[in-house]
Amino acid sequence: MTAIRLYNSATRRKEDFVPLDPLNVRMYVCGPTVYDRAHLGNARPVVVFDTLFRLLRHVHGAGHVTYVRNFTDVDDKINARAAEMAAAGDARPVNDIIRELTDTTIGWYHADMDALGALRPTVEPRATAHVAGMIAMIEGLVARGHAYAAAGHVLFDVRSFPAYGRLSGRSLDEMIAGARVEVAPYKRDPVDFVLWKPSEPGLPGWDSPWGRGRPGWHIECSAMAEALLGPAFDIHGGGIDLMFPHHENEIAQSACAHPGAGFARVWMHNEMLLVEGRKMSKSLGNFFTVRDLLDRGVPGEVIRLVLLGTHYRSPMDWTEERRAQAEATLRRWRGLVAGIEPAPSPAPAVLAALADDLNAAGAIAALHGLATEGDAAGLAASARLLGLLEPGMGAWVAAGRDPAAVAALVERLLAARTAARAAKDWARADWLRQAITAAGVVVRDTPAGVEWELGPAFEPAKLEVIE
RNA sequence: GGCGGGUUGGCGGAGAGGUUACGCAGCGGAUUGCAAAUCCGUGUAGACCGGUUCGAUUCCGGUACCCGCCUCCA
């Protein structure tokens, strides 16, 4: 069996990956808050952990991996968006607006991530379906002395968990010194964080021992991971910006709810996506969505290849040049594997690169090697391990061409050029080729005759005016 | 201020204490009526200063610069 090594953020070392149960490898990844389209930065962890999911399925068997990715569908940003919609004239009850908003956003998310070739996780729980579990976990924390109720809130007593700060490498004293923690009169200590808070009438709320309210952000992941994966599981993933405070708080909640269980064994964090050298984020307003790119005609497969071109633990810049290179590469590879039956298993070099802390860039280099060797079957099988060259994702290569009409026109023009060449009328032959090329059609004279295909910049209009 | 990460050839981007990363571009050649495509060949780069070592871009220390987190964020 292939030995997988993964960098564990919790130990800051690359470690051999040994699943708790090889027959059920378990992974939890923090999913989106569903109030808006996913931007490209959101797509990075999706593609990264999808690739890990594929690797785990390959090594341990497709039926022996459980991948959970949540939808956060209760959140202040969602409430705020619903309030905007109400203010804009939506007369429905706010809960109905929210339900539709979150349902719609989840639909968008699925469509956009599907386009990137991401497999659906095994389970995609909605936070609102697990509120009972959250309440139960909070009750347990209160009973064990790790949480306290105050003014309708329930707060986690951070001082009761000595290991707090270990994941992100910071101490409580440092945080106090930073003095940027939220102070509230009902907190025993400024670093304590909210597990449960009151909800106003007209906003989503659930009955609880502390009155009608809603959960804090962090508790949902602890509760859903426990419900779906158990108190101890193998991998927990997410963006590095979640390491503190979100993941730190998750650990505190889960470790105190289940002392000794261990919670997640390996923590993995992907680095940020940059635009113009700065992190892409909604708060900075410098984002564009996956849908924007798809609508501009950038195939999801191309986006995926660009995202996989940089190691997940390094920041990556989205650039037009890399998009163009990725598209050219995929066109070449797609041409190579067309009609070829994939090999029974991926190439060892590709598998080895991925197994080494998900070195996708190294795996892509190995794919180039297979292409150079002309091993189309190996390329096809290996690329699929990265979610590339999948049969269902190649339509873009041929997209935009109207098969019959365009082909007939191109053939007619090329026949004219061939005739000119036969007559050694080089001027006319070259003029025709130049005009056809300018329309975005790639023309190749080969010993077997003239070949052509539509390039990425094909413009039918230019072709039609040649005659 | 505290914590974490980074700095590789024209560009992008990996691994490894001593042997070619890889891709794109460039250059030379084959081929071609001319091209394109393809094929072959081609680049001693590793922010700076020290240290360890027979040998470091790779390990250690320092300096500079960049980025992220510390507030919602993938």
Image (tube, grey):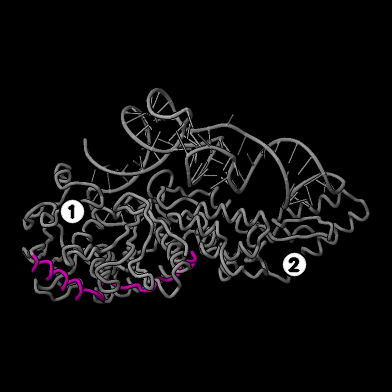
Above-or-below relation of A1 to B69: below
Give me the chain letter of mark 1: A
Is A142 a magenta residue? yes
- What span is in magenta? A115-144
The amino acid marked with disc number 1 is Tyr
Camera-nearest residue between A243 and A422: A243
Residue sitting at 15 percent across and 72 percent down? Answer: A201
Instruction: Specify few, some or many for label 1: CA neighbours under 10 Å numbering under 14, 14-19, or 20 or more.
Output: some
Q: Earlier in the sequence, mark 2 or mark 1?
A: 1
Q: Quadrant of residue A129?
A: bottom left
Instruction: Specify few, some or many for label 2: CA neighbours under 10 Å numbering under 14, 14-19, or 20 or more.
Output: some
Q: Nearer the viewer, mark 2 or mark 1?
A: 1
Residue sitting at 61 percent across and 55 percent down? Answer: A329
Q: Quadrant of residue A141?
A: bottom left
**Left or right: residue A332 compared with residue B58:** right
Camera-nearest residue between B71 and A268: A268
Residue sitting at 45 percent across and 56 percent down? Answer: A358
Pointer 2 residue: A407
Question: Can residue A38 be seen in the rendering of this structure?
Answer: yes
Give the x, y percent position of residue A250.
Answer: 23, 61
Pointer 1 residue: A164
**Left or right: residue A414 compared with residue B3:** right
